[in-house]
């Protein structure tokens, strides 16, 4: 439904206004006239809303976000909507409430009878519409990656740092979507600022945790929080970063007054070490597997399937090579995502492509619709696996 703001500067109070139109019958009519303050009023716009958003807007539970060089978005607590102007060929008259309308007298035998008249203050050329869109989180990754938190405290003071209020002013996403984006980036709040911890520093903390698990006979499925934190603090790691390490590579499985119990996640640990090996470039499969298996703790049973969406394999002659391509490093916008993927490979089998697009979030578009829009599907035979190439 359209919403009209009540302008405080519009005219002298009289008797009739927009209220007289609320119960107007389909076959009825009403006289209209120009309001004394009729004009373009560019600061007064119509906003068309879905019924489910009406209460959020009326009770001011929404915010407009965006920089001057960006299209504006409207955010509720959990969703993001692009604000679009839609023109109309019909004349839409904006009539202020009763306190700001006017009346006039008719002539003839009813000269002394006052005729109610609606005063038009503006003719609207169209209205603003809201279209649900995916949060624009690529900017979040970009700005937080400019200044990684590392073990060298001097380096952490360089560059811009961002508090929560800074992020909601810069990133076009709802509060819930922004929190989910920070979690996906493994960001942590340190001294009031949101930071991404350098992978090499995280590697040092994780290795020390695993080393101490061997020395102290800790099970990786039942790490006692207080013991882990106490030991790693004595090794010189900040308490906040020890908790962050547990959060990134594990999950709390038991709550307790003294902190509870954590379990390391096998896949997250295996992915971490695979990334470290491939950071310098691709490796032959045999060489990669040998080093990777050597780095994994004995309690964890690694499987190459754990690296789905993290690595690509390719045949070069008789050799199979492994190289890094993490889905977390790819853009969140479908057009940019598919562009990069087809630069990596001209043709993709579905089993290889699916891990790299399953996280794409476009309201109103399914994975099948995205494939139709951005890819061409070919299938040499009925029994063959489908192959996707750029459209």
Image (cartoon, rainbow, N blue to C red):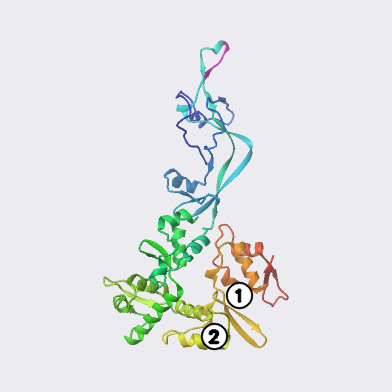
> How many discs mark residues in the rendered view?
2
**Crowdedness of circle 2 by 10 Å Cα count: few (<14), some, many (20+)?**
some
Task: Inspect the magenta stretch and tell me whether residue 139 lies in it.
Answer: no
Do the residues under discs 1 and 2 have CB atoms within 8 angstroms? Answer: no
Which residue is located at x 50 percent, y 46 percent? Answer: 51
Residue 277 screen position, x and y as percent? 51, 81
Residue 91 quadrant: top right
User: Residue 246, percent across and down?
Assistant: 38, 74
On screen, residue 135 versus residue 217, left or right, reads right
Q: Which mark is residue 288?
A: 2
Q: Secondary structure at mark 1?
A: helix
Residue 41 as seen in the image, left or right of residue 378 = left
Of circles 1 and 2, which is in front? 2
| 160 horizontally vs 128: left or right | left
Q: Nearer the viewer, residue 24 or 174?
A: 174
Q: Pick the residue in front: 241 or 79.
A: 241
Q: Residue at 42%, 87% (x, y): give it.
A: 298
Q: Nearer the viewer, residue 378 or 274?
A: 274
Q: Quadrant of the C terminus?
A: bottom right
Give the vertical position of 53 relative to 390 (above or below): above
State which tag comes first along the sequence, 1 or 2.
2
Please tell me whether residue 176 is drawn above or below residue 358 in the rendered image: above
* In the foreground, 9 or 118: 9
Q: Secondary structure at mark 2?
A: helix
Q: Dot 1: within a 10 Å radius of its alpha carbon, few (fewer than 14), some, or many (20 or more) residues?
A: some
Quarter of the image where one finds residue 286: bottom right
Extent of the magenta region: 104-108
Query: How far from the left and from the top, in percent, is residue 306?
Result: 51, 79
From the image, tell me which residue sits under label 1: 352
């Amino acid at each position: 439904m359209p919403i009209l703001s009540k302008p405080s500067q519009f005219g002298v109070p009289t008797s009739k206004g927009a209220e007289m139109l609320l119960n107007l019958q389909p076959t009825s009519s009403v006289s209209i006239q120009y309001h004394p303050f009729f004009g373009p009023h560019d600061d007064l716009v119509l906003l068309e809303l879905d019924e489910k958003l009406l209460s959020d807007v009326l009770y001011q539970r929404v915010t407009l976000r965006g920089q001057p060089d960006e299209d504006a978005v409207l955010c509720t607590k959990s969703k993001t909507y692009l604000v679009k102007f839609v023109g109309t060929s019909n004349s839409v008259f904006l009539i202020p409430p009763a306190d700001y309308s006017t009346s006039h007298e008719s002539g003839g035998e009813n000269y002394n009878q006052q005729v109610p008249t609606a005063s038009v203050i503006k003719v609207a050329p169209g209205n603003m519409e809201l279209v649900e869109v995916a949060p624009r989180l690529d900017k979040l990754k970009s700005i937080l990656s400019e200044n990684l938190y590392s073990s060298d405290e001097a380096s952490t003071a360089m560059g811009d740092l961002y508090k929560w209020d800074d992020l909601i002013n810069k990133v076009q996403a709802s509060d819930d979507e922004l929190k989910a984006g920070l979690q996906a980036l493994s960001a942590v709040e340190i001294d009031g600022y949101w930071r991404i911890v350098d992978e090499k520093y995280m590697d040092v903390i994780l290795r020390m945790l695993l080393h101490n698990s061997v020395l102290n006979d800790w099970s990786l499925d039942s790490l006692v929080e207080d013991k882990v934190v106490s030991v790693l603090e004595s090794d010189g790691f900040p308490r906040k970063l020890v908790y962050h390490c547990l959060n990134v590579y594990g999950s709390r499985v038991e709550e307790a007054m003294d902190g509870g119990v954590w379990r390391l996640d096998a896949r997250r640990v295996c992915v971490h070490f695979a990334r470290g090996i491939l950071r310098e470039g691709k490796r032959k499969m045999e060489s990669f597997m040998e080093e990777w298996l050597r780095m994994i703790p004995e309690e964890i049973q690694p499987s190459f399937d754990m690296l789905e969406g993290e690595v690509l394999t390719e045949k070069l002659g008789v050799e199979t090579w492994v190289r890094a391509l993490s889905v977390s490093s790819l853009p969140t916008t479908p057009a940019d995502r598919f562009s990069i993927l087809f630069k990596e490979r001209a043709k993709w089998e579905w089993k290889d492509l699916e891990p790299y697009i399953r996280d794409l979030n476009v309201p109103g578009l399914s994975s099948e619709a995205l494939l139709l829009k951005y890819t061409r599907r070919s299938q040499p035979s009925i029994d063959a696996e489908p192959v996707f190439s750029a459209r």
